[in-house]
Amino acid sequence: MNDRVCDLCRQLLLCGASNLDGDEARILKMHLASCGECRKWAKRISGLEEMEMVVDEMQPPAGFHNQLRQRLLSQKQAKLPSEGAWERHPWVRIGFLASILLYGIWMLWGGNLDVGETVQPWLAVSTDFIQQTWLALGGITVSELVPLSASWIYQAAAGLLILGLLICSDWGFEKRKDISL
Amino acid sequence: VGELAKQKQQGVNGAQVTPIPEDPEEFLALVQPWEGPLYRHCCRLLGNQDDARDLCQEGLLRAYNQRHRYNPQYKFSTWLFTLTTRLGLTEIRKRQVTPLWGAKPADEIANLSDSARNPRGRMQQKETQQLLLDALSRLPVKYRVPVSLFYEKELSLAEIAEILEITENLVKMRLYRGREKLMHMLDPYIRNQEVEL
């Protein structure tokens, strides 16, 4: 029984006298008056508390406050550029690269795959116009433009669509953020 | 209830702390009284004053960046200590300097006791500080954190429980075990002091 009271007494002492309620403080006082071992404990704890008080005198190093001010102000001024969908969602980057790759393959092999060989009248006009422009700008021969057909228009449109979607999604997600730690 | 809510909203010297100002200068003025206590807490957590300075600054910067998340129903100091303690725990886990949930090998504690038996008599204040910080850094983290918070007289056991998200009884238990271990580690030094006195 006495051991249990001693345990309780030591627990109370180690939890700090300031945290004891009235009953606990009374029990402690009564027990300490009658138990020499616990009085020794109390003395050792007061020795520990003296050491702890030395640490309480530690102060932040000189310049701490100014350094903190500088960091705070520089952080306030230099807000990070907007972090778009590109950075936040890796799948956007992966999707973008994959679509470029697919688009490249499609461009290279499109002529041999008979994609969109059925040329609509308005597309025929368009392709003809593009071919003419291309020729005028680059002087490329007609034979080089053989793979250019309606499929080329589809490919270009698909590429532009992907690019547009990516840009729109980036704008949609865009939100200015402070530098977060 | 009104009085309790009012008390909760009060910071050091009873200053109102809500809302947390956006202006950096005002924010700095608000946190200045807490720089010392937070710095000491960081020292006790990391056992190193340089790292403690960095951690303390990181904690205060995080408090500024997350000021919109502060709930004025709680004491400002509790919130500051919570943020800094979480950062400190992350830092400790990153480094894994000490085992998180286990004690240091006995020989290291013995070394500490040897240094505590330093025959030079009364140790200088700095040495005493370092001795205590060393002993604290040898405590398992689950005891070190409540013990460190316990030294801040501003924080009650209920607030420590709130910061650590554990029950008050568990805080008492960890305080008891932690300080008991600490006393065991520092016993030679404490006895030495008693003899000198």
Image: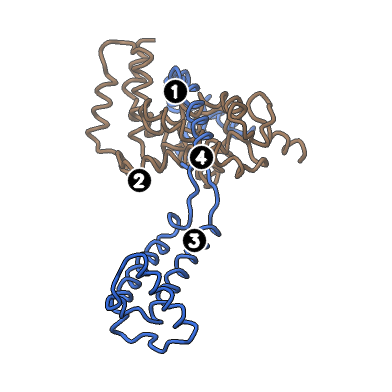
Chain colours: A blue, B brown
Viewer-proximal residue, B58 or A123? A123
Per the image, the residue denoted by label 3 is A167
Per the image, the residue denoted by label 2 is B101
User: Which label sits in the foreground, 1 or 3?
Assistant: 3
Q: Do the residues labelled 4 and 2 touch (CB within 8 Å)?
A: no
Q: Earlier in the sequence, mark 4 or mark 1?
A: 1
The amino acid beneath tag 4 is: Lys
Pinpoint residue B111: horizontal percent, then vertical percent. 23, 27
Residue A52's mark? 1
User: Which label sits in the foreground, 3 or 2?
Assistant: 3
The chain that hosts pointer 3 is: A
- Res B55 visible: yes
Query: Do dots 4 and 1 share one subunit?
Result: yes
Viewer-proximal residue, A82 or A108? A108
Furthest residue toward right: B2
Packing grade of label 2 (10 A; few <14, some 14-19, many >=20) is few
The chain that hosts pointer 2 is: B
User: Which label sits in the foreground, 4 or 1?
Assistant: 4
User: Which label sits in the foreground, 3 or 4?
Assistant: 3
The amino acid beneath tag 2 is: Trp
User: Which label sits in the foreground, 4 or 2?
Assistant: 4
The amino acid beneath tag 1 is: Glu
The amino acid beneath tag 3 is: Ile
Q: Is A181 situated left or right of B156 in this image?
A: left
Per the image, the residue denoted by label 4 is A79
Packing grade of label 1 (10 A; few <14, some 14-19, many >=20) is some
The chain that hosts pointer 1 is: A
Q: Element type at marker 2?
A: loop
- Measure how far apart labels 4 and 1 are at the Cα level: 42 Å
Q: Element type at marker 4?
A: loop
